[in-house]
Amino acid sequence: MRLPGSVAEVQASPPGPEIGAFFDLDGTLVAGFTGVLLTQDTFRRREIGIGEFLGVVQSALNHQLGRADFEDLVHKGAGMLRGRSLSDLDEIGERLFVQKVVSRIYPEMRELVRAHMERGHTVVLSSSALTIQVQPVARFLGIKNILSNRFETDDDGLLTGKVLKPILWEPGKASAVQKFASEHNTESTFPRASSTPTARKTSR
């Protein structure tokens, strides 16, 4: 069965929350890699040193080349924000979104999200990114369901520099999506953006 991939196809698809549309963040809803934007912003505001900045950038490059573990990259990203409060994260995430991210949202993907919502489908932003990157985009698009990597906090509510396990990446992310779909009795579909981009849905 060919799953709906265009706005017209979504509008003609069956209505109801049993249809689940799971959108990724980087490269799907948003052009580029939001983790790089966060790292650049943190460095420019002198909240991390050059060594830490270069370490995160190198890990990101190694990961893209298949030479680094994603879990290590995500922990380095979280480490940049060690000692911050959750309220600080909301402020940083919203500022970064307004200044750098909102202009990178693909218009056609925004329309696709809206089309799913109008059909009453269960829309989920499912990403291996951290909450600071994911939540502002979800709020802007009106997506209430989020699956993302979350920060670990200490007894005072401050970030420890670590991420809660299991890490949402490849098998871990697939398991989280399958668990959500099972718990909400939805059939999973995965909208994607190509480099053009044009939206497509494929099942996994």
Image (spheres, helix red, strand yellow):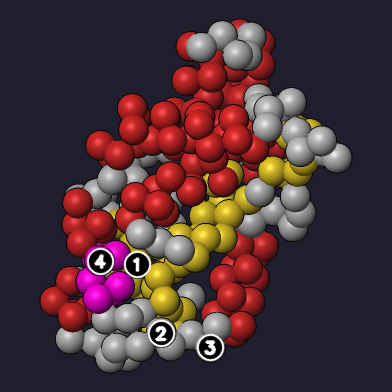
Task: Tell me where residue 174 sits by quadrant.
Answer: bottom right
> Does label 3 or label 2 sit earlier along the sequence?
2
Callout 1–callout 3 Cβ contact below 8 Å: no
User: Can the viewer see residue 72?
Assistant: no
- Report the mark closest to the observer, 1 or 2: 2
Quadrant in which the N terminus is drawn: bottom left
Quarter-of-image position of residue 63:
top right
Q: CA distance from mark 1 to mark 2?
A: 16 Å
Give the numbered dot on residue 191.
1
Of badges 4 and 1, the one in the foreground is: 4
Task: Give the number of the disc on residue 85.
Answer: none
Q: Which residue is mark 4?
A: 114
Secondary element type, mark 2: loop
N-term-proximal mark, 1 vs 3? 3
- C-alpha distance separating marks 4 and 3: 21 Å
Q: CA distance from mark 1 to mark 3?
A: 19 Å
Q: Amino acid at mark 2?
A: Pro
Residue 182: where, in percent of width, then height?
A: 59, 84
Query: What percent of the width, then of the height, locates residue 123?
Result: 40, 70
N-terminal-most mark, 4 or 3: 4
Taking the image as shown, residue 19 lies to the left or right of residue 47, namely left
> Dot 3: what SS?
loop
- Spatial CA span between label 4 and label 2: 14 Å
Using a 10 Å C-alpha cutoff, classify the residue at mark 4 as few (fewer than 14 neighbours), some (14 to 19) or many (20 or more): some
Q: Are marks 1 and 2 in contact (CB under 8 Å)?
A: no
Which secondary structure lies at badge 1? strand
As displayed, is residue 61 above or below residue 102? above
Read off the magenta span. 112-118
Badge number at residue 17 = 2
Q: Position of residue 28 (x, y in %)?
A: 35, 53
- SS at badge 4: helix
The Cα atoms of the two marked residues, 3 and 2, are separated by 8 Å
